Amino acid sequence: MVKAIVVGAAGRMGRRIVTLVHQTEGIEVAGAVERCDHPLIGTDIGGICGLGEIGVLLDDTLDACIDRGDVIIDFSHHEGALSHVTTAVAHKKAAVIGTTGLTDDEAASVRELGVGTRCVVAPNMSVGVNVMFQVLQHITAILGDDFDVEIVESHHNLKKDAPSGTAVKMADIIADELNRNMVEDGVYGRKGMVGERTKKEIGVHAVRAGDIVGEHTVIFGGIGERLEFTHRAHSRDNFVKGAIRAALWVVDRPDGVYDMQDVLGLRA
Ligand code: NAD
């Protein structure tokens, strides 16, 4: 039985992770962690998630419960993710990091530190999105510089970071394939007299409205035609199932930093 510690456990994703881990064979909830000032610290996480009591109280630090787990599943906040990886590495526990919005420095540090244990880092754990990452790479290689690339992502009005980690990853995949980079060629929204679109730019646009779970459309605009690829998440459970799959996969791997392409066997 794999013992999972859910970090950010009382959040929107955390509650679904606790619920589905509890309902999945071969894995169980061994710990639940929230930020230290969360009002539900000390409460049974099963009760918080509507499962009834499961005998796991919400802790205010990962250190308090790390020894009870085999793997941490982190869907919390970018400011905490690095310290959670540090704790996992120090205790030789596996880690699945789904938290997005990390700064470039934080993301680099997570990758540097993560090699000290078994670690999956993925801004989007859905199977469909990870297949789309592959498709985008192939399509971009075929279409090359002749098509203008624009990415539009839409999420609920409570999302804190923009653009989404998934849109950032899609943009990076496309930019790499076209020998461009998003620092120089990324354009994030447009307003005013911005002039004609340059051939190299890759546009990224974030919509925030209502309760949209997550949508990503990549437009390849050519002359006289365009291609559009869209992924729509209908519920958070597709990310949750991916995270649980990653947790079960990573516990027995050699130390290293992996992503969902590795978990799903999609890496060429
Ligand atoms: P949320 O705000 O509902 O939940 C985050 C929870 O983390 C909150 O309960 C908050 O109190 C807690 N938290 C904040 N700082 C913490 C800390 N230092 N230690 C422990 N807990 C802490 O947000 P959400 O919608 O559940 O999303 C959480 C994260 O997961 C976001 O970064 C989001 O973008 C990301 N996400 C990733 C995927 C994916 O597939 N990788 C999918 C959906 C969401």
Image (cartoon, grey):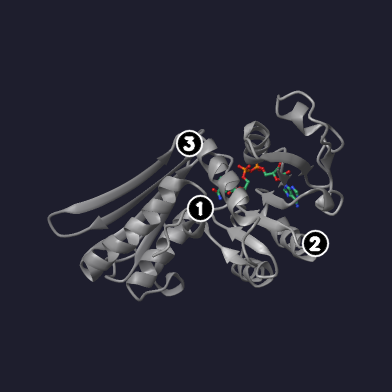
Tell me the quarter of the picture where residue 145 sits. Answer: bottom left
Per the image, label 3 sits on a secondary structure element best described as loop
Per the image, label 2 sits on a secondary structure element best described as loop
Q: Residue beneath label 2, please? A: 91
- Amino acid type at image mark 2: His
- Amino acid type at image mark 1: Ser
Tell me the quadrant of the picture where the N terminus can be found.
Answer: top right
Nearer to the camera, 99 or 226: 99
- Amino acid type at image mark 3: Ile
Q: Is residue 190 something that shows in the picture?
A: no
Mark 2 and mark 1 in contact (Cβ < 8 Å)?
A: no
Nearer to the camera, 204 or 137: 137
Q: Residue beneath label 1, please? A: 164
Mark 3 and mark 2 in contact (Cβ < 8 Å)?
A: no
Per the image, label 1 sits on a secondary structure element best described as loop
| Pointer 3 residue Cβ closer than 8 Å to ligand 1 | no
Q: Position of residue 217 (x, y in %)?
A: 35, 49
CA distance for labels 1 and 2: 31 Å
| Pointer 1 residue Cβ closer than 8 Å to ligand 1 | yes
Q: Is residue 120 something that shows in the picture?
A: yes
Q: Position of residue 248 (x, y in %)?
A: 61, 49
Q: Residue beneath label 3, please? A: 212
Relative side of 253 to 150, left or right: right
Tell me the quarter of the picture where residue 236 sits. Answer: top right
CA distance for labels 2 and 3: 37 Å
Q: Position of residue 57 (x, y in %)?
A: 84, 36
Q: Is residue 62 above or below residue 258?
A: above
Mark 2 or mark 1, which is nearer the start of the sequence?
A: 2
